[in-house]
Image (spheres, grey):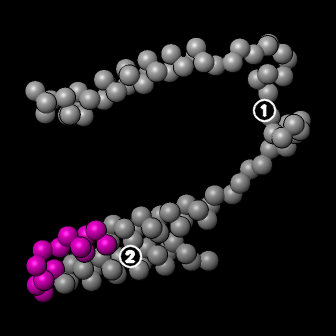
Amino acid sequence: MSNILLSPPFAFPIVLLFVMFLFRQSAVFSAIGKITSGKNRAYGCGEDNCELKVRPEYSSFFSIAFFFTIMHFVVLMIATLPKITLESLLIAVFYLLCAMVCTSMLFRE
């Protein structure tokens, strides 16, 4: 019985219900505010919110993230190869060559 209580499918709903209960009960301690016109507006250090929208550029981030994905995959595949034989060595070299080709294609100008 104690193992069933610790299993994730059984424990998650119990913890979820407990957290929902705590969330509802914490409303007792919250301050009651007055309804004003600017209550739901963004606030930053007492200044008015300017309507200037910043659009960051993520193109370099995606290429670097893809690079790390390729490298993690290659390391995982090489680390989980069976005992060292000629065949496993060839597989490792193949993965490294593929990673080098992908990296050169990714960062070409």
Residue for badge 2: 99
Of the 4 image quadrants, the one containing the N terminus is top left
> Mark 2, residues whose alpha carbon is within 10 Å: few (<14), some, or many (≥20)?
some
Of the 4 image quadrants, the one containing the C terminus is bottom right
Going from N to C along the chain, the mark reached first, 1 or 2, is: 1
Numbered disc 2: secondary structure? helix
- Determine whether, in the image, residue 103 is placed left or right of residue 84: right
| Residue at the spot 27% in from the left edge and 83% down from the top edge | 93
Of all residues shown, which one is farthest toward the front?
A: 29
Q: Nearer the viewer, residue 5 or 56?
A: 5
Q: Are marks 1 and 2 in contact (CB under 8 Å)?
A: no
- Determine whether, in the image, residue 66 is placed left or right of residue 10: right
Q: Position of residue 47 (x, y in %)?
A: 89, 38
Residue 88 lies, with reference to residue 61, above or below; the image says: below
Region rendered in magenta: 75-88
Residue 50 lies, with reference to residue 56, above or below; the image says: above
Q: Nearer the viewer, residue 82 or 19?
A: 19
Measured Cα–Cα span from mark 1 to mark 2 = 46 Å
Numbered disc 1: secondary structure? loop
Identify the amino acid type marked 2.
Ala
> Mark 1, residues whose alpha carbon is within 10 Å: few (<14), some, or many (≥20)?
few
Identify the amino acid type marked 1.
Ala
Decide whether residue 79 is among the magenta residues.
Answer: yes
Residue for badge 1: 42
| Residue at the spot 35% in from the left edge and 76% down from the top edge | 98
